[in-house]
């Protein structure tokens, strides 16, 4: 698995997540927005990628088409 680049907006650490449904789709989000007082809300749309590799590659390319 590839390493995730930092958040393109705040520079925070990114994390790989999965949807909480039967499809278990991967997406990447900024960890800085996970705490009780969110500072950054950068994340990919949850249903865009079917594989972990696709989600990581897109995040690392800094895709900016609404993701």
Image: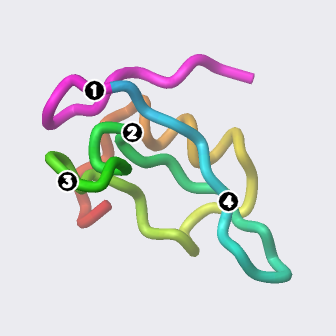
Most extreme residue toward the bottom, as rendered? 22
Q: What span is in magenta?
A: 1-12
Residue 28 position within the rendered picture, expressed as x and y whole percent measured from the top left: 50, 47
In contact (CB < 8 Å): disc 4 and disc 2: no
In terms of image quadrants, where is residue 65? Answer: bottom left
Residue 55 position within the rendered picture, expressed as x and y whole percent measured from the top left: 58, 47
Select label 2 or label 3 by which is in front: 3
What is the C-alpha distance between the residues marked 1 and 3? 15 Å
In terms of image quadrants, where is residue 57? Answer: top right
What is the C-alpha distance between the residues marked 4 and 1? 19 Å
Residue 12, numbered circle: 1
Q: Residue at x 72, y 62 (%)?
A: 50
Most extreme residue toward the right, as rendered? 22
The residue that disc 3 covers is 37
The residue that disc 2 covers is 31
In contact (CB < 8 Å): disc 2 and disc 3: no
Does residue 48 lie above or below 2 as drawn?
below
Q: Residue at x 29, y 55 (%)?
A: 36
Scheme of image coloration: rainbow
Quadrant of the rendering where the N terminus is positioned? top right
In contact (CB < 8 Å): disc 4 and disc 3: no
């Amino acid at each position: 698995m590839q390493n995730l680049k930092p958040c393109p907006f705040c520079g925070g650490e990114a994390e790989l997540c999965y949807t909480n449904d039967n499809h278990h789709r991967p997406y990447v989000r900024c960890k800085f927005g996970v705490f009780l007082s969110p500072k950054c809300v950068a994340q990919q749309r949850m249903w865009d990628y079917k594989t972990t590799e696709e989600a990581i590659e897109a995040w690392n390319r800094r895709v900016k088409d609404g993701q």
